[in-house]
Amino acid sequence: MKIIQIKEIKKILEKKQQNDQICLNCWVRTNRDSGKIGFIEGYDGSTLANIQIVYKKETTKNFESAKAARIASAIQVIGKISKNERVSLGYEIVADEFVLLKQADEDYPLQKKQHTMEFLRENAHLRSKTRTIQAIAKLRSKLAYAIHRFFQENGFYWVSSPILTSNDCEGAGESFYIQEDKEKPFFAPQAKLTVSGQLNAESYAQGLGRVYTFGPTFRADRSHTNRHLAEFWMVEPEIAFIDLEQLMSIIEAFIKTVVQDMLNECRDAIELFAANNSQILERLKNLVEKKFIRISYSEGIDILKKAVADGYNFEDKNIYFGKDLASEHERYICEKIYNAPVFLYNYPKDIKAFYMKINDDNKTVAATDLLVPGVGEIVGGSQREDNIEKLYQQIKDKKIETESIQWYLDLRKYGYNSSAGFGLGFERLIMYILGLDNIRDAIPFPRYEGKLKF
């Protein structure tokens, strides 16, 4: 019988033709035997599903090698696809021949038992062998593609913003400085790792109209919360000739589209996490189906003041206009009041960055945060200030050094009309979709204070 060289479990499951003879390369998830017959759960990364491989003493060549194969060992199996309604997939492989390609050492740390996410982080070089991390990695890859697809299909151009920079995009966070030879410096002024690609995106939006950056950014904040990393990825589109209202419509379309794409393309990954968190699928369905609410920051403050007056138990009950809201306040608005995503807009200028457009009231700026149930703020954006005199005044008021961003200010002198954009933390969106508790699990090799392993 002809051997069909199929190397992926995914293709085997798609074909599902009983008695077809196949060749499969994979790794061992589990292995158990009862003397004359054994069962291996195999995986190869093409799907989250494991396939059962049956080996028998009487009919499988190299039966003893199959029996000896440890967890994580690389194997090759030649055999037939057989229907078996007692296994989860409904099909299994009955091995005619078994080859132990590479035996795993006995001290392999990820044995068949429950491991904490913290333990997996300590073994980040091996954790891709677990179904949990495979699911996250699969969705991360598909989500990145969906983000590029959304922008490319809507007339945006991708711009590769620099990783080395001399500015800190004021308000974005502490910068990492590049150590140089003080006697013979390579850059002047001293180089930093970028905290944001926004300013560079604004520059190219003035020539291309619609652009976006999507790449690594770095923050030297000494924060150990479950939502902070020192190295992470940011999505930052910038669009010329639009205002804040139009920006909110673009954000809504973007978020709904990429989340729906993940429901369509990564259902298996989402359902793996939803098995332990029944709210995940309902929350995502709610996001893609409901119209996003739009209320002003001032209205949000009034809602929170009323909640405090009614006895709601916030940790921070000191609510006033000008307050930088905490996650508990944001979640109260979108979860308890509206049970839907909420745009909060027109923030006090004193708590926002210098480049945001000052409104006519001279107290607020045309800025918005998107608040989503279960997380709070997930997107931040604004219309940019186009008046160079107002920009200079904001810089003076906020005591910002101007030399490194003079080029950015100069943009306003050469046809800079209305422009707006937003920033989305890529890993935070992954956290939201899968209901992850810690952002360190949303990136392959997390970097945070004290951790630079792997």
Image (cartoon, helix red, strand yellow):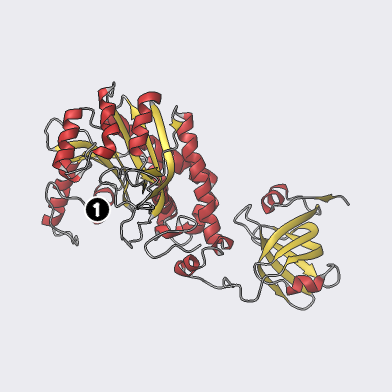
Image coordinates of residue 35 in percent, x first then y, are: 77, 78
Q: Quadrant of residue 310?
A: bottom left
Q: Residue at x 40, y 25 (%)?
A: 208
Q: Where residue 176 appears, x then y in whole percent?
A: 35, 53
**In the picture provided, is 397 more to the left or to the right than 88?**
left
Residue 28 position within the rendered picture, expressed as x and y whole percent measured from the top left: 67, 66
User: Which residue does the image show at 63% across and 52% down from the upper left?
Assistant: 46
Taking the view exactly as shown, the residue that stands out farthest to the right is: 1
In front of the other: 136 or 453? 453
Front-most of 53 and 44? 44
| Residue 73 in picture, x, y percent from top left | 68, 67
Q: Is residue 271 left or right of residue 192?
A: right
Give left or right: position of 441 versus 188: right
In this view of the protein, can residue 358 be seen by the observer?
A: no
10 Å neighbourhood of mark 1: few (<14), some, or many (≥20)?
A: many
Q: Is residue 159 left or right of residue 33?
A: left
The reply to whether residue 392 is in sight is: yes
The residue under the point 69% across, 47% down is 14
**Residue type at the position of mark 1:** Tyr
The residue closer to the viewer here, 250 or 306, is 250
Q: Residue at x 62, y 55 (%)?
A: 45
Q: Which residue is mark 1?
A: 332
The correct choice, above or below, for 19 with respect to 120 in the image is above
Secondary element under disc 1, as helix, strand or loop, is: helix
The residue most toward the top is 415
